[in-house]
Amino acid sequence: MTDQWVIPFYKKQFEWLRDVEEEMASYLQQSADKIEEQIGVTFESMLDIGAGVGSIARVLDARGIAMTTLELVPELVETARIRSPKSVDIHMGDFYTYTFSKQFDVVSYFDGFGIGTDNDQLTLLKRMKDWVKDDGSLLIDIYHPDYWRTMAAGQKMKIDNAERIYSFDEGNCRLVDSWWHAEHPEDIVAQSLRCYTIDEISAMCEKAQLTIVGIFPGGAMDFDKWAYIETAPLSSCLSYRIKVKKTT
């Protein structure tokens, strides 16, 4: 079962941030390019879990990929249904309990892995393995502990109607991202996400009978220059993406 903070946090985040999807059109196309490049072969179907309002699903749908999404937060699901063509198969539910009657060439989880305990993450990996075809691939974004521990912790910023501050829970190796509305600083919502080294996530994948076959460093925020670096070194990126296959 998904942690209780998840729906309140993402609901508030959605309410407080302005809609920037049109402004992100070029970025979304680049993201879709990366997904296709990382998979490395032509694929026909994809399940994206934790899909939010379905932005990347719509881009890939327009490229002829049969897209299915799964999202927990009702407001995000409703927005996805309004914005998406009927060819995108949109589901609302908890990825720890939801079931699908078919398998997919690709199963992805972008920008969100780590919401639960280690056992929760292991359960999710096993479920993703069941959802993907035997010759298919998983793509999962993993938060890098070194970045959140040494570079992001303590950083505070304002975004639209919200303010946020990063911290790091060393004992549990979790990034903590706390948000509040500028007019109501006492009303704080926070997400807490487990960070994993490559060795840690590799060992977890092995327990799920999965094998990492590709690692792709993500970006990083340079807080001194207040500039985002699109691709940072693996040692200093905020997250890295793993491509995973079923162990044979």
Image (cartoon, rainbow, N blue to C red):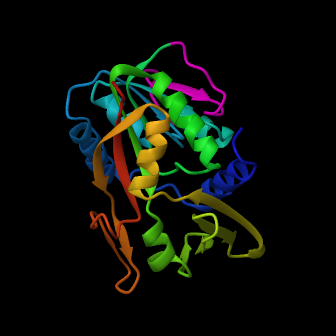
Front in this rendered view, residue 114 or 180:
114
Tell which of 186 and 5 is nearer to you: 5
Foreground residue, 223 or 14? 223
Determine which quarter of the picture holds residue 88.
Answer: top left
Residue at 41% over, 81% down: 223
Q: Is residue 131 left or right of residue 190?
A: left
Q: Does residue 12 appear in the picture of this structure?
A: yes
Q: Is residue 115 left or right of residue 108?
A: right
Per the rendered image, the range of residues in magenta is 83-101
Which residue is at a point 49% across and 71% down the rendered structure image?
148
Q: Is residue 4 above or below residue 40?
A: below
In the rendered image, is residue 82 in sight?
A: no
Quarter location, residue 52: top right
Residue 142 image point, x, y percent: 44, 53
| The C terminus: image quadrant | top left
Residue furthest to the top = 101
Q: Main secondary structure of the magenta part?
A: loop
| Residue 53 place in picture, x, y as percent | 52, 42
85 inside magenta stretch:
yes
Q: Is residue 247 above or below residue 194?
A: above
